[in-house]
Every structure is written in C-alpha cells, then in structure tokens.
Image (cartoon, rainbow, N blue to C red):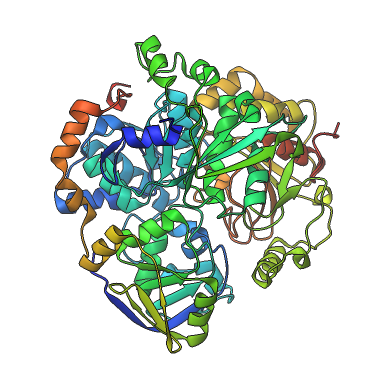
C-alpha cells in the first residue's frame, strides 16, 4: 500500500505502540537543566550520548563573549555553565560558547550534516520542525520529554494525522519562503494545523533551496502543527554532500534516502492547495504570526473579523502594537531591524539581505543588527565580505546566537520600540517587554532598515 | 507526579484566545535551572501592568489555542505552582497539552459554549475517571486519551513505565535501528 513520507518514518521508528525511537536528540541550555537533575535524582543515565548533541544558543550574548564564565548576566552564565557541566558528566558532545561550531541548535544540525532524511529528531524547542526540511520527522518537546529521551532514547507519542499542503505555480519576484509560510499561517490560523504532521509539497517547494525549505518548516509550529516536512531530493543531497556527519558510504545512503518521499497514490488525512502566484511579501500587524497581511494592504479593522472573540483579540493586538486600523503597512515607521534567528540567519538569508543593503545606508532613525545563526555562518559571511557590506551600510554585525528573537540575552527591544524582524514570533513582549514586532523576510527587513519604514520589495529601488 | 482524580472548586477566568507560553512564563524566568519557584512569575507582564488579576483557584478557564508557541515546560510549572490543578479551554497547543499531562496538571477540552458556561458558573468539578465537568447544574463530557488518563489517574512516572520495555528498545537497536550520524565521533 502506498505510504506517506510521515507514515514511513513513523512506522520505521515504532519500538512498540506509541513508543517512538529517536535518532537524534538536540539539547540546549534552557530546557535541559531540570531534565539532567531528574536523571540524577532517579539514578538514571543517558542511554545514547552518541545520538545526542548540545549547544548553547538562547542565552549567548552576541557581542563576541568568548567563554561561558565571561557572560555578564549571572543567570545566563549559570545556565550555560550548567549545560557544560551536565554534558561533561553524561558524556554528551557539546559545542558551547567559544566553539567554532557553536550556533543556534536548528542551524548547526543541518550545517554539520547531523540532520538527515528519514530520521526522527527532537529537541526541547518548538522550532525543531526546521529539520523536517530534509525529510526528517522533527518536532519540539518539553523538559519532561527531554528527560525521557535522555534516559530511554524514545518518546511516548500518539500518532498525529497527516496533511499535505500543495503549492502550485511559482513565486513572484521578491517573494520568499518566509512569505510562503506567513501567508499559509495567515490563511489557516495559528491552530489551523494542530494535530497534524504537515508535508509541504508542489512545484513552489521543489524549487526552494534547502535553506528556504528550512524557513518554511521552521514556522510550522506557528500554525499549530508540531512537524513540517519536505521530501528529500537532489537539492537536499547536494546541500548535504561533504558535510562532517554525513555517511561515508554516500551512494548507499542516497539509495536509502530516495525511498523516503511519499509514494504515488498515498493518501493524507487532509489536503490543501495554495497558488504560489497569489503570495505577496507579507508583514505581520498584530501579536500572533497569523495576524498578517501583504505589504500592499492596510492594518485591518477589528470590525472586519466575524466573531466577537476575534474582534476583541484584534483590538487588543492593535492597542499593544500602537497601530490604527486603516494605516498602510508600507508607511509604518520602525525603530529597530533584526536579521537573524533560527528562521532566517543562514548564509542565503544574509546574502539576500546584503544584496539589498549593498551601497545603501540604514535610515538615521533605525538601529539595525545582523546576527548570523552559527559561527560557521559568520565565518562564511565574513569570507564573502558580507560583514563589510552590512557595516558599511550601518548595520551592526554580531556573533552567533538566538539574539533578539526571544530576549533572553542582552539583545532586546525597549518598551514601545517597533522592530522589523526576520524571526518567528511577534507575541507580546517576545523581543523585550512592551516591544512591538513585525515579522518579515530578510529582504523586506533590510529594505525597511534603509527606508526607515516598510516598503514593497518588489517595486522598491 | 501526583495522581489526579477530581479537581473541584472555584474557577479563575482568562477570557483570551491564543494565550502563548511567552505570556504564561516570560523569558526572563527561563534562565533558572530549578523546577520550582515559578508560581510567583505566572503571567508576569500582564499581572504587573494590571491587565490581568488571577486568584489561585483550583481551575483556570481560558480561550482557544491555550499554551501556543514555545515548548517551555516552565509555563506548566508556573500554572501548577501558582495553585491551579486543571485548565479548561476549547483547545490547547499540542506541546503544552503534553507538558501538562507529564506534570499532573489536568488539561480539559470543552466546547466554546461549555467553557463559557464554566466561566459564568465560577465553580466546577472535574471528574477524570468519569471524564466529566459539572458546572452550573449541568454536566459536560470531555475526551482524553485512555493511556494519558490512566497515567494521570495513577500518577505514573512515564520514564519508569518506558524502562519496563527496555528489552524492546534493545531489540529495536539491534535489529531495526537505521544507520545515522554518531555525534561522539564528530
């Protein structure tokens, strides 16, 4: 019987009913300390350190602080040092602050070649869905589950339902993977895909680069689904070849990976279609990623929502964001611009932003920063001269980390500061208490930095 | 975790949809490495700016898609350590729902109308064994996975349960495990 990619991976990893084997467990400093404590309390050990990999990212200052003991914030320092101690105690490989391979956990997995098709990958972070771009089943878990995976290398999971979103046609000029996923969440809502493992497919997806596919899969959780996936193909294999952790017997691995995609005739519990040509550059206006419109639109009126609950939610969002209904999106002025995060901090994202910034100047009213997702991305960007393009244009060039995506490190917004951000969440206070976040693509963020307000990248020159 | 059978008492109301875990437990409290002491930081920014006042009742009733966003289990610890034993909402995010069940915080899904009814009644009794919520003179049934219910009713340690199947994991690794990268040889 023909099977979906999701079903093949699920069945191939079922140890017994509802118990799934985990091929790779990624660990970071925020959601793991209590899990390691739990192991110690129960006298348990880590079953497979060889299938576990740790890095420090959320708390890492992006000012080039070279080692954990020099992190200025005592709580951040303690959390990173605790991770280092726990990894030493349980023999888990770690790329902590100062390591050449340190970076955002969802950037370094693919970069090292640890992320491979057909695998199950988990991490105590909701953006673990990023790794699904390689045809892996990857999802975020809580700290109790982190402890469970450390102890057993398995996870108790109910099988989600399967869903395929098919993107036909092609994307227009200036429209990116970020816009694809924002438009999708805008259409389906923040819980529209809850309970499903989503496969993104169709000509639009097939033409995306690996890094763009990661951007799409990354934000799957913002639509309510835990796992998002793309079938592995020659684009996937070309991206992986030569990376440190890929199999030595490459040809045999390719044979195995070519059997991962969904079989012809397989059925999904739910199928949806989008036309790539309908998607425009997107900008969020509210406090969930589903509150999003295209850049040519205006801030919607709460009256345009059907239910009283939705109207109230929109009113509250507008009050928090300091926006009036009817304001053209393209006219919204910004204080800050952030290019980075596990959604958009890879080399292609930085190249795209640099193309926009090249030879121009950041507006005098804007403070803009670019934060590479990993040390490797930073090194490569510097080798290509992107850092000089950014600094010449007035952007700050920082060191790798989660940075201003979530305000756990010194990079935060002040109250009421308005930021164009390439990250994934525009929740209240996400980038700093009272901060106002608009989610956009790297190109749109860079152009907004130059102009001091949003512009339509398609017609901007 | 402690067993959960019946949760009964007053209801605190948070009548908002899409309450994300960044609101439930803001980022600055995620730097702690302990599992306790989160109760006082629950909804910290909303409480501090006066938008929300919450009493430590046994039950919290909220709008749809409760607990969306970040996987931080600190959100569940905060709700529990503040004093709540159950959360009633029309829907929960998947990760948050799972995190609740691993900690003995009872998540209850009711229809929008019934959640509204619970909010208006101000008091309710949740019977996990019977899978019912009684409020305002009527009783509504809720669905919960049979295994999850069993584990909540008995306060099971999920890791201990899984370790009973260690032989199955051993044989999976021997016979069916797919080749994959070894991080220890990077």
- Vertical comparison of B130 with A38: above or below: below
Residue A351 in view in this figure: yes
**A347 sits left or right of A57 in the view:** right
- Vertical comparison of A118 with B122: above or below: above
**B69 sits left or right of A304 in the view:** left
Residue B83 in view in this figure: no
Whole-percent x and y of residue A115?
42, 28
Task: Please tell me which residue lies in front, A73 or B107.
Answer: B107
Quarter of the image where one finds residue A372: top right
- Vertical comparison of B63 with A395: above or below: below
Question: At x 44% / y 81%, what residue is drawn?
Answer: B11
Whole-percent x and y of residue B91?
49, 63
Task: Please tell me which residue lies in front, A366 or B154.
Answer: B154
How many numbered badges does the structure rendering display? Answer: 0
Q: Which residue lies furthest to the bottom in this view?
A: B137
**A314 sits left or right of A71 in the view:** right
**A284 sits left or right of B111 in the view:** right
- Vertical comparison of A364 with A13: above or below: below
Task: Please tell me which residue lies in front, A305 or A103.
Answer: A305
Question: At x 52% / y 85%, what residue is drawn?
Answer: B120
Q: Quadrant of the C terminus of chain A?
A: top right
Q: In which quarter of the image is the N terminus of chain A?
A: top left
Quarter of the image where one finds residue B78: bottom left
Whole-percent x and y of residue A202?
62, 30
Whole-percent x and y of residue B96?
42, 58
Quarter of the image where one finds residue A251: top left
Question: At x 22% / y 42%, what residue is drawn?
Answer: A152
């Amino acid at each position: 019987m023909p099977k979906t990619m999701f079903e093949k991976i699920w069945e191939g990893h079922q140890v017994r009913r509802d118990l799934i084997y985990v091929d790779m467990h990624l660990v970071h400093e925020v959601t793991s300390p209590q899990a390691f404590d739990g192991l110690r309390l129960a006298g348990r050990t880590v079953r497979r350190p060889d299938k576990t990999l740790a890095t420090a990212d959320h708390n890492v200052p992006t000012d080039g602080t070279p080692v954990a003991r020099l992190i200025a914030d005592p709580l951040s320092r303690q959390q990173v040092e605790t991770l280092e101690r726990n990894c030493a105690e349980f023999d888990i490989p770690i790329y902590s602050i100062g390591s050449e391979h340190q970076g955002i956990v969802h950037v370094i997995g693919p970069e090292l070649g640890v992320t491979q098709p057909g695998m199950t990958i988990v991490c105590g972070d909701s953006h673990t869905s990023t790794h699904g771009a390689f045809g892996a089943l990857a999802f975020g878990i809580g700290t109790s589950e982190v402890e469970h995976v450390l102890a057993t290398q398995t996870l108790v999971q109910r099988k989600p339902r399967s869903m395929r979103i098919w993107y036909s046609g092609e994307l227009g000029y200036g429209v990116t993977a970020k816009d694809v996923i924002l438009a999708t969440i805008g259409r389906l809502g923040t819980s529209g895909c809850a309970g499903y493992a989503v496969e993104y497919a169709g000509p639009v997806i097939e033409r995306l680069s690996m890094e763009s596919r990661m951007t799409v899969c990354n934000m799957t959780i913002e639509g309510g689904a835990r796992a998002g996936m793309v079938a592995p193909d020659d684009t996937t294999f070309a991206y992986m070849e030569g990376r440190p952790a890929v199999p030595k017997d490459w040809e045999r691995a390719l044979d195995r990976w070519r059997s991962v995609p969904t079989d012809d005739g397989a059925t999904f519990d739910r199928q949806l279609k989008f036309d790539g040509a309908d998607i425009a550059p997107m900008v969020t206006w509210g406090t969930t990623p589903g509150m999003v419109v295209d850049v040519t639109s205006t801030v919607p009126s709460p009256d345009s929502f059907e239910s009283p609950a939705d109207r109230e939610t929109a009113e509250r969002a507008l009050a928090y964001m300091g926006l009036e209904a009817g304001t053209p999106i393209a006219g919204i002025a910004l204080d800050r611009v952030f290019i980075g995060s596990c959604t958009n901090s890879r080399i292609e994202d930085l190249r795209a932003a640099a193309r926009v910034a090249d030879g121009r100047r950041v507006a005098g009213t804007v403070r803009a920063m670019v934060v590479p997702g990993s040390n490797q991305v930073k090194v490569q960007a510097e080798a290509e001269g992107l850092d000089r393009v950014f600094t010449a244009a007035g952007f700050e060039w920082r060191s790798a980390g989660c940075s201003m995506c979530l305000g756990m490190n010194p990079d935060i917004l002040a109250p009421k500061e308005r930021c164009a951000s390439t990250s994934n969440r525009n929740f209240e206070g996400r980038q700093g208490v009272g901060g106002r976040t608009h989610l956009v693509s790297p190109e749109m963020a860079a152009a907004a930095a130059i102009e001091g307000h949003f512009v339509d990248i398609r017609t901007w020159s | 975790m402690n067993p959960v059978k019946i949760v009964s008492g007053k209801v605190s109301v948070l009548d908002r949809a899409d309450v994300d875990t960044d609101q439930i437990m803001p980022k600055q409290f995620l730097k702690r490495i302990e599992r306790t002491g989160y109760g006082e930081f629950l909804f910290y920014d909303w409480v501090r700016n006066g938008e929300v006042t919450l009493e430590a009742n046994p039950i919290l009733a909220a709008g749809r898609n409760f607990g969306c966003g970040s996987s931080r289990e600190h959100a569940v610890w905060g709700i529990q350590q503040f004093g709540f034993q159950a959360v009633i909402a029309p829907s929960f995010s998947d990760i948050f729902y799972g995190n609740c069940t691993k900690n003995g915080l009872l998540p209850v899904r009711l229809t929008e109308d019934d959640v509204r009814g619970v909010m208006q009644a101000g008091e309710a009794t949740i019977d996990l064994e019977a899978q019912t919520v009684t409020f305002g003179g009527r009783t509504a049934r809720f669905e919960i996975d049979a295994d999850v219910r069993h584990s909540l009713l008995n306060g099971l340690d999920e890791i201990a349960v899984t370790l009973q199947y260690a032989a199955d994991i051993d044989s999976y690794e021997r016979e069916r495990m797919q080749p994959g990268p070894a991080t220890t040889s990077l």
